[in-house]
Image: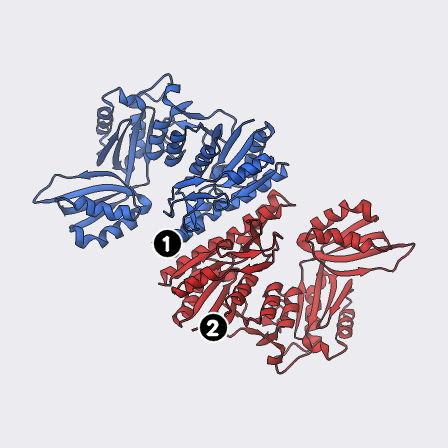
Chain colours: A red, B blue
């Protein structure tokens, strides 16, 4: 007997037939004698519809009310999944975030999990009951519904797996594993049988949508064995594991891209101490994450500051910056959402030089201008104009020798 | 300054534009200096979709999970309404059943309200905050979501109005008041400017969908001043008031019909003491309401027993009865959902004889067979074949002199 967490993404529960199919997979684990917690996303499209409504009503929405609206999607799936399991003769009940409770901080719209109380769920396990948990949602310090950000159900699943000390956390999705890059764009993309937590973390945070960043981070910190697999096939998926479990290491394991970026240039700002703080402080106070930053050479004591934020935060970021214009003092703001971030990722970079150079050269050869650069120990990212996305991905995939099975 | 409860039904919040329109009506009351609690239904169609999903998954569903699924509809509207009010500059926040808390008993799917704790909402009032309450839902004794049955948002509104000691409870719907009968069927139906609680109660419980039965009952018990009006026009609606507030009394005030009925005949059951209990006990245990009952004359110690249940309970009722067949002992069950219940209603019946006779004669003149009859002090109901619905309503409307303004 083992404890398993199974998480089903939006496409895996997109309609009643698929929910039934997912329920059958849960039943297999139950029949094998396992204690199972199931985490469900909203039915595919449901969250988009709910988000769209909140935007139509109130573009600069109150995140607390946004959370009330969007959390409804997972609530529906949780109930339907419990009912589907009951039809199969499986004892099951649904758990909403506030019922568990899954406690988060108070940052509505992108809350962080603080504690998962598994006592009630484990009481259910003792009675042979499957726990069907609404993903993506928790309860904040004021007793209001919080949500964990897009893809947050992955994080719910990993947090639950960690709290339950589960043997495995299976993430069922519409792809059958993690690929060297997006196979819809690069036909020669290869499925990875294993990937390290660190690489998966960079892949996720650089735009590969297969897992949410924080879920990987949490899996790494708690050493939760993660498996990404398809709910539509029985093919083995990709295991996310420790680096020492991987024998053959490529220098570059994957290439990610993110269209969720937007660039803001603050023009002709005073180049004096404290200006960066005056700009980035208010953004942080409004829970707007800034990713890449580049500052131009100063001229006449004025400089241009360019940085990226999440595209969905662009309007709010501009509003926040305009409100501190009197304090900061700048000539103009130039927002630009017509950008894409491309990242090459691999733990092999730690021991191999020249990865960044090869990237810049490959892009230059295709006539692609690099707007912003950022790097980490196992990653190089560049911001380029959105229309070059596919060209850049294919060129880089070939350049790093990823076109054939490794 | 007064305290007002405004309730918006599904068609009044059917899309973003209508939610905005409803929010404007709330703002009018706020601008007039009133403390306002808004109760919202799910967007029109949303509940049907959710119910349909639960049926597709699991026809004999676990009512606790059914409640989890269907309560999501009102949750969405509550968040969207709060956001809409905020856009208009109105301080507002949403309240879900479990947050208020609005406590109910544990009869999932048709729970009864036991207590409404208004402390938190009144704290909000003190800060000028509008409370937007998700209708139809509460929290049961085990901390799980309960729902109040179809149309339950009316009950939420009246319960809240009673608990808040509100001056008025306005029920905004898609009709501009209570009519002598359904104007979609009888073109000459007249809008009533006033109706007594008792009549409204019978109208609602006999199928007039404008208000949920329990909401009227509760309004009567707590003397909540109820107004039914349209959210699409500014015409005055119908006031539901005490009998002594109505000067001119017609003998019959309205004619209601209900297609939500189904008939079950238990054939050749033993005509001995305890049989009725053996049949109706298990139905009651399964929270299936039985309405009209008729028993045939006994023959050979056997009799036929015919009664009506809600159409949505028909499958469950048959299943329950089949399961107690060994105890009860009967020849066959004949379920029939091809029926309609027609009721004539009026407090004037208390002092006037002949109302029932006129009903039976009118139907007989049209060749309509009466299957079951039931009566109360201010009402006569008959069950007839569904295809006669329109014919019966029009004939009775004319017969009782309701075709012209009273």
Vertical arrangement, residue A39 with respect to residue B361, above or below? below
Q: Chain of mark 2?
A: A
Q: Is residue B23 visible?
A: yes
* Residue B145: mark in rendering: none
Chain that bears disc 1 = B
Bin the neighbour count of mark 2 within 10 Å (Cα to Cα): few under 14, some 14-19, many 20 and up: few
Residue at left offset 9%, top offset 45%:
B301
Q: Quadrant of the C terminus of chain A?
A: bottom right
Look at the numbered discs 1 and 2 and tell me whether their residues touch, using CB distance below 8 Å. Answer: no
How would you rate the neighbour count of disc 1 (Cα within 10 Å): few for under 14, some for 14-19, many for 20 or more?
Answer: some
Q: Position of residue B13 (x, y in %)?
A: 51, 39
Nearest to the observer: residue B71 or residue B277:
B277
Residue B259 x/y as whole percent: 32, 39
Q: Which residue in the rendered view is the most extreme toward the left?
A: B300
Q: Position of residue A389 (x, y in %)?
A: 69, 64
Residue named by callout 1: B62
For mark 2, what is the residue?
A234
Q: Residue at x 16, y 50 (%)?
A: B330
SS category of the residue bearing label 2: loop
Number of marks drawn: 2
């Amino acid at each position: 007997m083992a404890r398993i967490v199974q998480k089903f993404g939006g496409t895996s529960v997109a309609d009643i037939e698929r929910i039934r199919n997912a329920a059958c997979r849960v039943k297999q684990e139950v029949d094998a004698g396992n204690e199972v917690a199931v985490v469900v996303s909203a039915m595919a499209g449901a969250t988009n519809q709910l988000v769209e409504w909140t935007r139509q009503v109130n573009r600069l929405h109150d995140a607390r009310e946004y959370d009330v609206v969007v959390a409804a999607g997972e609530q529906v799936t949780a109930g339907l999944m419990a009912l589907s399991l009951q039809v199969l003769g499986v004892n099951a009940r649904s758990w909403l975030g506030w019922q568990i409770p899954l406690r988060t901080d108070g940052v509505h719209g992108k809350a962080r999990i603080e504690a998962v109380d598994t006592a009630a769920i484990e009481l259910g396990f003792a009675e042979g009951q499957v726990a069907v948990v609404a993903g993506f949602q928790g309860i904040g310090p004021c007793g209001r519904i919080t949500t964990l950000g897009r893809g947050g159900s992955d994080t719910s699943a990993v947090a639950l797996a960690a709290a339950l000390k589960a043997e495995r956390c299976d993430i069922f999705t519409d792809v059958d594993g993690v690929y060297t890059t997006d196979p819809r764009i690069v036909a020669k993309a290869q499925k990875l049988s294993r990937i390290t937590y660190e690489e998966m973390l960079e892949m996720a945070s650089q735009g590969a949508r297969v897992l949410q960043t924080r879920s990987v981070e949490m899996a790494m910190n708690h050493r939760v064995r993660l498996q990404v697999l398809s709910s539509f096939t029985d093919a083995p998926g990709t295991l996310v594991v420790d680096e020492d479990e991987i024998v053959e290491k490529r220098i570059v394991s994957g290439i990610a891209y993110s269209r969720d970026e937007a660039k803001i240039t603050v023009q002709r700002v005073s180049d004096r101490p404290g200006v960066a703080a005056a700009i980035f402080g208010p953004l942080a106070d409004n829970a707007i994450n800034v990713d890449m930053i580049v500052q131009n050479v100063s001229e006449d004591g004025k400089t241009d500051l360019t940085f990226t934020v999440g595209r969905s935060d662009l309007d709010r970021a501009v509003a926040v910056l305009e409100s501190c214009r009197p304090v900061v003092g700048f000539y103009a703001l130039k927002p630009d959402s017509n950008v894409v971030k491309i990242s090459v990722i691999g733990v092999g970079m730690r021991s191999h030089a020249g990865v960044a150079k090869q990237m810049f050269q490959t892009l230059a050869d295709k006539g692609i201008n690099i707007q912003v650069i950022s790097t980490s120990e196992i990653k190089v990212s560049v911001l380029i104009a959105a229309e070059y996305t596919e060209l850049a991905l294919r060129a880089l995939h070939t350049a790093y020798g990823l076109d054939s099975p490794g």
